[in-house]
């Protein structure tokens, strides 16, 4: 039976498939292109398209989080690292063939997992249609950001604080591991300056003589 779609639903479907096509094309291009800088830029385009799909599905918090965290921080960090390392394109293309079997194995495993998730989702949806669930209790309608904030800071508060503490320890560990003391650099010692008894001293110097 054919169902007539409204112009809004038709436009929404076309926009959805357009963003989905951009995501798939950019994801394939990230693996295929030879220039690593181009690969990072294509990954940024894939992140933007994914954020647009999240916003279209009503998950505006996840969409904005994807743009702020992944595009604004992680992708920019990747771009700076790739440009600072100055990776040789010729050396990268020569060593690419030996990784093809491993890449195919990982891709096959991911496709099998996606197929299993789709099949399980379809089966659970059919069971829900066959056995309708009782109506849920009425509750005030809240947006996704408010719902997520209430859930994190009520049921998962301890887990959220532990995750923040682990990230803080990782940041401190990175600072400690990369910190190096240099002897050839003049450093200011505030304690020694405060411990001095003479703050200032007047010296009478003869003409054309140094101190």
Image (spheres, rainbow, N blue to C red):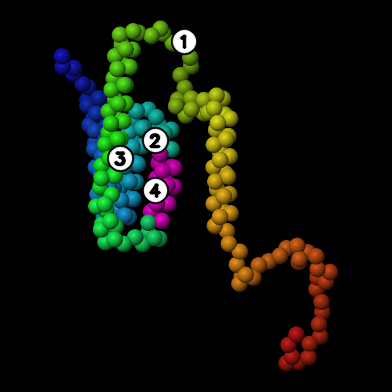
Residue 106 image label: 3
- The answer to whether the residues at label 1 and label 3 have Cβ atoms under 8 Å apart is no
Image point 39% across, 29% down: which residue? 59
Q: Is residue 199 magenta?
A: no
The mark that comes first in sequence, 2 or 4, is 2
Q: Is residue 32 above or below residue 15?
A: below
Q: What element carries label 3?
A: helix
Q: What element carries label 4?
A: helix
Residue 54 location, quadrant: top left
The residue range painted magenta reads: 66-81
State the image coordinates of residue 29 (x, y, percent, origin top left): 25, 47
The mark that comes first in sequence, 1 or 3, is 3
Please give the residue where the numbered disc 4 appears in the rendered image: 75
Tell me if 138 is positioned left or right of 41 in this view: right
Q: Is mark 1 on a helix, strand or loop?
A: loop
User: Mark 2: few, some, or many residues within 10 Å (few <14, many ≥20)?
Assistant: many
Frontmost of labels 2 and 4 is 4
Please give the residue where the numbered disc 2 appears in the rendered image: 63
Tell me if 123 is positioned left or right of 140 in this view: left
Image point 74% across, 91% down: which residue? 209
Q: Nearer the viewer, residue 53 or 88?
A: 88
The mark that comes first in sequence, 2 or 1, is 2
User: Mark 4: few, some, or many residues within 10 Å (few <14, many ≥20)?
Assistant: some
User: Mark 1: few, some, or many residues within 10 Å (few <14, many ≥20)?
Assistant: few
For the C terminus, the quadrant is bottom right
Q: Is residue 90 above or below residue 134?
A: below
State the image coordinates of residue 156 (x, y, percent, origin top left): 54, 27
User: Mark 3: few, some, or many residues within 10 Å (few <14, many ≥20)?
Assistant: few
Please give the residue where the numbered disc 1 appears in the rendered image: 137
């Amino acid at each position: 039976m054919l169902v007539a779609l409204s112009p809004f639903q038709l436009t929404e479907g076309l926009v959805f498939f357009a963003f989905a096509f951009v995501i798939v094309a950019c994801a394939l291009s990230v693996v295929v292109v030879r220039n690593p800088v181009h690969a990072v830029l294509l990954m940024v385009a894939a992140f933007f398209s994914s954020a647009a799909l999240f916003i279209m599905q009503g998950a505006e918090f996840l969409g904005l989080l994807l743009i702020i965290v992944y595009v604004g921080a992680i992708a920019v960090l990747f771009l700076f690292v790739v440009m600072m390392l100055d990776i040789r394109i010729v050396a990268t293309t020569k060593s690419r063939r030996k990784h093809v079997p491993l890449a195919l194995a990982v891709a096959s495993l991911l496709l099998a997992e996606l197929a299993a998730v789709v099949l399980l989702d379809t089966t659970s949806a059919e069971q829900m249609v066959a056995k309708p669930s009782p109506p849920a209790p009425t509750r005030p309608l809240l947006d996704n950001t408010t719902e997520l904030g209430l859930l994190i800071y009520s049921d998962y508060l301890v887990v959220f604080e532990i995750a923040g503490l682990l990230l803080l320890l990782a940041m401190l560990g990175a600072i400690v591991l990369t910190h190096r003391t240099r002897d050839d650099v003049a450093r200011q010692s505030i304690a020694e300056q405060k411990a001095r008894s003479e703050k200032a001293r007047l010296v009478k110097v003869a003409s054309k003589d140094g101190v």
